[in-house]
């Protein structure tokens, strides 16, 4: 809502500067978006009249004008625009003017002819984007006066952001009422002095409401013998300041009164209404109406129309129809001033994609009891500025009067919610400043508050408490902290564990990234995911922004790979990242998609940099596995194992499934070379683990265990085994055979090459033997080792070197 | 037969050899030569048995004296030599202490996670718990239970991502990507009795085309306190305490200009400013500005007015309390919400919200 300060002062006296007023409005809930001082930089711009237009001697596209302003001699000015004619009044910037668009006017030779100024367009004057040529001023304007004075530009316009609960502030009177409440001044509503003719409106026009639920009230006046022409300059200027384009006196008056009162009005050319009838009804399905903007619209029965005896003539509350529009030939007017059901207007406006100043007000709720005042006000203007004669009486169909609402309010409740100590008197004072009537219940501090119908937002006690709070001033309310004993803050165990896992990964050298929960479904193809795979159980957006963000991610991999690629493409070749975030999937037959927190890891490039003490080393499968193991270690999970894992996205020989107990919690491995090629990325290792399952399996019970009292004996063995024998297999045998004296075993060397047959490998293990109750003898340890050796050779066909 | 003079000559030679020794090894050779099992002095002592008692007494005394003296000499020399050797070894072992240390390479938490942690820690200290919820939400939790009318613009297909329901009629669209983390509040309240003191950090989604200040996904921290006797004053006090800890001197957030924030407060300025506003789920509602921590409130390029809009807040609307089964006559509450990216951008001068999700490691590792 654009509010001219000068216009506002028609209704309320205040001595605040626009800036001071804006501060007060901001702190009471009407946000001021901008403050625009008009007429700035319009010094040396005058109203001129064009006396003569000649072609420029040296340029086809230019003309040479003679313009008179308030000086003895007319000025010769070169002009390029074509929309001027002799007798037009135009803004003339003379030598020395500094225009808002930055232009400085100096005497200039244009193609050999000296020009002593410039005729200005609206854009050049900072008055809008209208580039249609020179700004032709209204005819009734005085020549020779400064433009700011002629156009009443010695004014400031503030732009208000009106919240949807305050439709009353979409009017000058509403804003004035608000300013009055803040500044404790009284509002002046313009009185209407209407001279009616002796002809009765109801004798010539009939209004019928078929659907009173959608149109609870329809008021109309008939005005005859109007002369269509421009509206007075002051009215045009006020409309312009409010961001509306002047059209003609009748339309301008309806707009002006709408801006003033908040009540949208519509003027029909009465003689085009068949049967002199107004019928307010739902549209019929596939009924058509050509609206004022020239678009033919197909209607349906959810929409409300204004019809005459035969056809729809307006889309109720949104836009009039072309057939009944006021034109230059219009003589008689039927003026509509109605109240429509807000949600009906909103629905229709949305479904047609048609917004207007009127619909913006109706859909938030206008004042059902303000229709007649607005109609009278507009009719009086039509008499005054269009020479019309107003028929006697308002045709007012209002089947069920909408009364102001009675809302209960308790002083104690006000203070309990706000934490204040506001007295009953102060409450009454604040509410009365807002034009709410207060009736205190005898002997109590409770009251009934009458919420006027222009305040549809005031329905409940809490609505009134908010009014009191904002006028009292939020910043005058004393700050306290809740005094509860019921606060036990802190993270829960799962949250603590989650944080410690992320910290551990950071400690392991990985950086955290955050990627969209959305992904590109085509990336799943790049991952070579087969049909039916859960990675394809997409949760699709109904209204995605684009294909790349059209489904919820079923895996963290794709977005992590893209981050990796983004970095590699920018010379960041060593990427070690993780993300903890949700993945989503849609099971067929289920309504609600599922989601689960996952941990994703991606590694590429050097794990160890070239250093003065060692050579660089690329990340490999075991760096990835180390990162996974660090998570398991952080959570003290010991009963985990891995097994071969096959997935088309992964290298078949370098991928593993992680199991805790019997349960799969994810996978890790090298990306399949084809996938790497498809994404155009270097060798990359990825993991995706179910974060919730990891946390579920965290072992949180730790207990002291005895530190060994007796020394142990360390013995090493080298196991020469087939390539196909895994470390886990060897360990399993060693552990089983070493019972009960074997306390720990560790692989400390792995060797293939010279001295080892081609299809074999040598694995060296270090074993610690110990008894808990005595010092072990060498014989006992050796005996235990022999058992292990025997079992290894028997079960794995391994050859052992002690 | 050795004489006393022989012995004394031997000692003199030995003494000279000890003095001439330049290493512990040479010294040891000297020791062996004279005092070893077959050393020159040892062998004299071994022959004592063959002498007469008088000779034995005389020579024995001299020999023992010579041995003791020589042992003393050797010990002295040994100490001298070993300290020299230590010095030499230490000199040989010295390193260039300016070479870089072998440091384990650490990663970084994402800046958004760090800011969330900073915010979270403050509220944990104020007695709040952290609540979480799904990103895919029912319209009911995201809008309806939060008193948002069916025709509210935020619910439009223009503003909110809807999930395409498998096979359902489009009109049944009732599953959304949550547009704020407020639905978590509803879930928490529906699952427990008051008092409730929680914050809900997490992802939220709005159908905005990415540009420097918009992102279809962003992070929010919402807070909720519902208890007996919670007031608007409590909301103000809580947000003041939050802003003091978040933007004041005690904050871990590394912002150079922090001093001006403190100075602005010290001059008697308010830390925060509340402006009445409208939200469907709170009443009274406020937009909350924090004194600009870049300029201390005098107005600058970042803030314009001296204030930075950081939060939306208000008293929980009675309709919301009723919806979750609480009695608004018995308990009241406040709620607030803040955008994490916005705070991070303001605090660290990050110019473009998209950088948070591009994850350029040169960005991630800066913080
Ligand atoms: Zn500032």
Image: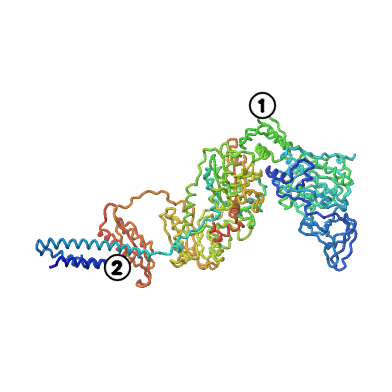
Q: Residue at x 52, y 38 (%)?
A: A485
Which residue is label 2 attached to?
A: B22
Between marks 2 and 1 in the image, the one whose residue lies nearer the viewer: 2
Q: Classify residue B36 as left or right of residue A559.
A: left
Residue A130 in the image: state x and y as whole percent.
Answer: 79, 57
On whether ligand 1 comes within 8 Å of the CB at mark 2, the answer is: no
Nearest the camera: A314 or B17? B17
**Considering only vertical position in the picture, is B16 above or below A314?**
below
Where's the N terminus of chain B, which quadrant? bottom left
Q: Classify residue B209 as left or right of residue B4.
A: right
Residue B236 in the image: state x and y as whole percent.
Answer: 60, 42
On whether ligand 1 comes within 8 Å of the CB at mark 1, the answer is: no
Marks 2 and 1 in Cβ contact (< 8 Å) = no
Which residue is label 1 attached to?
A: A443
Q: Secondary structure at mark 1?
A: loop
Q: Classify residue B181 as left or right of residue A470.
A: left
Q: Residue at x 26, y 56 (%)?
A: A776
- Mark number displayed over residue B11: none
Q: Classify residue B364 as left or right of residue A177.
A: left
Residue A93 in the image: state x and y as whole percent.
Answer: 82, 57
Tag 1, which chain? A
Distance, label 2 to label 1, CA atoms, is 114 Å
Where's the C terminus of chain B, which quadrant? bottom right
Residue A221: tell me if it is visible: yes
């Amino acid at each position: 809502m654009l509010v001219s300060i000068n216009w506002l002062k028609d209704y309320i006296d205040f001595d605040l500067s626009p800036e001071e007023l804006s501060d007060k409005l901001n702190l009471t809930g009407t946000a001021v978006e901008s403050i625009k001082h008009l007429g700035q930089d319009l010094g040396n711009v005058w109203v001129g009249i064009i006396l003569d237009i000649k072609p420029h001697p040296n340029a086809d596209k230019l003309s040479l004008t003679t313009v008179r302003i308030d000086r003895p001699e007319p000025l010769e000015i070169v002009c390029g625009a074509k929309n001027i004619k002799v007798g037009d009044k135009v803004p003339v910037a003379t030598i020395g003017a500094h225009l808002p668009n930055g232009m400085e006017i100096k005497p200039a030779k244009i193609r050999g002819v000296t020009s002593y100024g410039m005729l200005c367009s609206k854009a050049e004057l900072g008055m809008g984007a209208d580039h249609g040529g020179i700004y032709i001023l209204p005819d009734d304007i005085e020549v020779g006066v400064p433009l700011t004075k002629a156009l009443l530009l010695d004014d400031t316009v503030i732009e208000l952001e009106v919240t949807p609960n305050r439709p009353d502030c979409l009017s000058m009177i509403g804003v004035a009422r608000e300013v009055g409440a803040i500044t404790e001044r009284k509002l002046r509503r313009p009185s209407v002095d209407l001279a009616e003719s002796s002809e009765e409106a109801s004798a010539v026009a009939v209004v019928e409401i078929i659907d009173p639920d959608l149109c609870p009230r329809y008021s109309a006046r008939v005005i005859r013998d109007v002369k269509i022409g421009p509206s007075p300059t002051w009215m045009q200027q006020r409309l312009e300041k409010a961001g509306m384009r002047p059209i003609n006196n009748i339309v301008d008056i309806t707009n002006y009164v709408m801006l003033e009162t908040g009540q949208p009005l519509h003027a029909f050319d009465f003689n085009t209404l068949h049967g002199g009838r107004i019928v307010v009804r739902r549209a019929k399905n596939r009924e058509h109406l050509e609206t004022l903007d020239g678009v033919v619209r197909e209607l349906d029965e959810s929409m409300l129309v204004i019809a005459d005896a035969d056809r729809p003539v307006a889309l109720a509350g949104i836009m009039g129809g072309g057939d009944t529009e006021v034109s230059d030939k219009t003589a008689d007017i039927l003026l509509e001033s109605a109240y429509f059901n807000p949600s009906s207007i909103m629905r229709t406006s949305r479904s047609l994609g048609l917004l207007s100043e009127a619909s913006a007000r109706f859909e938030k709720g206008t004042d059902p009891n303000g229709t007649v005042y607005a109609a009278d006000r507009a009719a009086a203007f039509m008499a005054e500025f269009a020479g019309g004669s107003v028929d006697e009486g308002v045709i007012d169909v209002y089947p069920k009067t909408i009364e102001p609402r009675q809302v209960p309010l308790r002083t104690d409740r006000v203070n309990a919610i706000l934490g204040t100590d506001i007295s009953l008197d102060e409450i009454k004072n604040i509410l009365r400043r807002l034009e709410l009537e207060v009736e205190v219940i005898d002997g109590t501090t409770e009251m009934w508050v009458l919420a006027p119908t222009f305040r549809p937002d005031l329905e409940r006690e809490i609505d009134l408490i908010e009014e009191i709070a904002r006028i009292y001033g939020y910043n005058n309310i004393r700050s306290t902290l809740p005094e509860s004993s019921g606060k036990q803050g802190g993270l829960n165990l799962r949250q603590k564990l989650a944080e410690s896992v992320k910290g551990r990964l950071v400690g392991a050298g990985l950086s955290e990234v955050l990627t969209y929960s959305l992904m590109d479904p085509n990336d799943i193809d790049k991952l070579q995911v087969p049909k039916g795979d859960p990675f394809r159980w997409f949760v699709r957006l109904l209204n995605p922004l684009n294909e790349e963000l059209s489904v919820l991610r079923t895996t963290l991999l794709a977005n992590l790979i893209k981050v990796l690629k983004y970095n590699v493409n920018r010379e960041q070749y060593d990427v070690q990242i993780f993300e903890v975030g949700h993945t989503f999937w849609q099971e067929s037959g289920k309504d609600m998609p599922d989601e689960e927190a996952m941990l994703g890891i991606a590694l590429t490039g050097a794990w160890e940099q070239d250093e003065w003490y060692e050579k660089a080393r690329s990340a490999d499968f075991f760096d990835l596995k180390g990162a996974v193991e660090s998570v398991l270690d952080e959570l003290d999970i010991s009963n985990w194992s891995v097994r071969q894992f096959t997935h088309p996205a992964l290298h078949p020989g370098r991928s593993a499934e992680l199991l805790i107990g019997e349960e799969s919690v994810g996978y890790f491995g090298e990306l399949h070379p084809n996938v790497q090629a498809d994404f155009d990325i270097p060798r990359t290792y990825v993991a995706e683990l179910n974060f919730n399952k990891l946390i579920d399996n965290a072992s949180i019970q730790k207990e002291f265990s005895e530190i060994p009292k007796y020394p142990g004996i360390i013995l090493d063995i080298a196991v020469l085994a087939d390539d196909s024998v895994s470390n886990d297999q060897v360990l399993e045998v060693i552990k089983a055979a070493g019972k009960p004296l074997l306390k720990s075993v560790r692989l400390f060397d792995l060797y293939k090459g010279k001295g080892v047959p081609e299809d074999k490998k040598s694995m060296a293990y270090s074993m610690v033997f110990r008894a808990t109750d005595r010092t072990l003898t060498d014989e006992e340890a050796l005996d235990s080792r022999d058992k292990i050796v025997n079992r290894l050779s028997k079960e794995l066909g391994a050859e052992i070197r002690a | 037969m050795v004489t006393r003079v022989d012995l004394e000559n031997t000692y003199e030679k030995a003494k000279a050899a000890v003095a001439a020794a330049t290493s512990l090894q040479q010294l040891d050779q000297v020791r062996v030569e004279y005092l070893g099992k077959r050393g020159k002095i040892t062998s004299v002592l071994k022959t004592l048995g063959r002498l007469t008692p008088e000779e034995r007494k005389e020579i024995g005394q001299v020999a023992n004296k010579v041995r003791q003296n020589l042992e003393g000499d050797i010990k002295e020399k040994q100490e001298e030599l070993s300290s020299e050797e230590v010095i030499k070894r230490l000199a040989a072992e010295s390193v260039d202490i300016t070479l870089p240390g072998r440091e384990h390479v650490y990663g970084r938490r994402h800046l958004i996670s760090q800011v969330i942690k900073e915010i979270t820690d403050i509220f944990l200290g104020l007695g709040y718990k952290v609540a979480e919820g799904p990103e895919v939400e029912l319209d009911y939790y995201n809008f309806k239970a939060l008193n948002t009318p069916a025709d509210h613009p935020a619910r439009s297909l223009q503003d909110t991502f809807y999930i395409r329901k498998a096979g359902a009629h489009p009109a049944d669209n009732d599953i959304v990507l949550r547009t704020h983390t407020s639905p978590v509040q509803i879930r928490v309240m529906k699952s427990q009795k008051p008092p409730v003191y929680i914050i809900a950090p997490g992802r939220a989604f709005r159908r905005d085309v990415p540009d420097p200040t918009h992102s279809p996904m962003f992070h929010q921290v919402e807070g909720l306190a519902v208890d007996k006797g919670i007031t608007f004053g409590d909301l103000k006090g809580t947000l003041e305490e939050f802003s003091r800890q978040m933007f004041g001197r005690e904050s871990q957030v590394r912002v150079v200009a922090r001093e001006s924030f403190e100075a602005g407060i010290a001059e008697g300025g308010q830390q925060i400013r509340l402006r009445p506003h409208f939200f469907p789920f709170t009443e009274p509602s406020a937009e909350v500005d924090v004194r600009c921590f870049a300029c201390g409130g005098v107005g600058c390029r970042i803030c314009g007015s001296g204030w930075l809009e950081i939060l939306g807040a208000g008293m929980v609307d009675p309709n919301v309390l009723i919806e979750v089964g609480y009695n608004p006559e018995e308990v009241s509450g406040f709620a607030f919400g803040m955008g994490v990216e916005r705070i991070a951008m303001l605090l660290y001068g990050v110019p473009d919200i998209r950088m948070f999700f591009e994850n350029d490691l040169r960005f991630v590792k800066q913080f």
